[in-house]
Image (cartoon, rainbow, N blue to C red):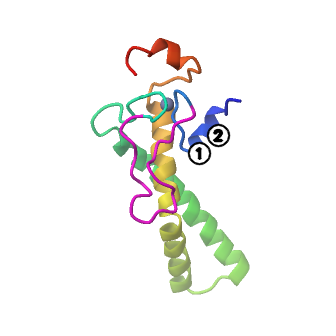
Amino acid sequence: MAISKFQAMLACKCPRCRKGNIFTNSGFHIKFGRRANVYCPVCNLRFEREPGFFEGGMYFNYALNVAILTTSGVATYVLLHDPGPFVYFGISAGMVVLFVSFTSRLSKSMMLHLFGDVSYDPDFQNKYKNRL
Ligand SMILES: [Zn+2]
C-alpha cells in the first residue's frame, strides 16, 4: 500500500517511489544521521536535483526552528510561570540542539518533496528499466 506524500515527507522517503530512504542512517545516529544517499536505493532517482539543491532546505530548517523556539518559549512561560531570561535561553537552546537531527533531515526531505520537481510514480520500474 502506497503512503501519502505527507507521510513520505515525514518518513524521509523518496518522492518518486516512496519506498527508498533519502538518508543512509537513522536520525538517531550521531555522526551520520544527516548523510543523504546520492541515489534512491529503490528507483535510482538522484536526490540532489542540481548542485547545492539541499541548501534551499535551510529556509525550511529556519521555519522549523522558529516553531520549536516559539513552542518552547510558550511552554516555558506557561509551565514555569515566566522564569528569568537565562531559563528561557537555556530551554530554547536545549530544544534546538535536541531536535537538530530531526529538523535538518525533515528540511531536506521537504525541499526534495516540494521543490524537487519529482512526482510520485508507482510504475517507475517499467519506465526506467533501462537505466537501472
Ligand atoms: Zn525512489
Query: Which amino acid lies under the numbered mark 1 shown in the image of this protein?
Result: Ala
Residue 92 x %, y %: 53, 73
On whether residue 8 falls in the magenta region, the answer is: no
Please name whichever residue, 9 or 21, is drawn nearer the observer in this view of the structure: 21
Q: Residue at x 53, y 54 (%)?
A: 64
Residue 19 x %, y %: 57, 35
Image height check: is 62 above or below 116? Answer: below
In the rendered image, the quadrant that contains the C terminus is top left
Magenta-tinted stretch:
18-39
**Callouts 1 and 2 close, C-beta under 8 Å:** yes
Query: Few, some or many C-alpha atoms within 10 Å of disc 1 (few <14, some 14-19, many ≥20)?
Result: some
Query: Which amino acid lies under the numbered mark 2 shown in the image of this protein?
Result: Gln
Residue carrying label 1: 11
Residue 106 x %, y %: 52, 49
Residue carrying label 2: 7
In the rendered image, the quadrant that contains the N terminus is top right
Image height check: is 102 above or below 80? Answer: above
Q: Is residue 104 left or right of residue 88?
A: left
Please name whichever residue, 51 or 83, is drawn nearer the observer in this view of the structure: 51
Residue 118, labelled with which disc?
none
Residue 58 x %, y %: 40, 49
What's the magenta bit mostly, secondary-structure-wise? Answer: loop
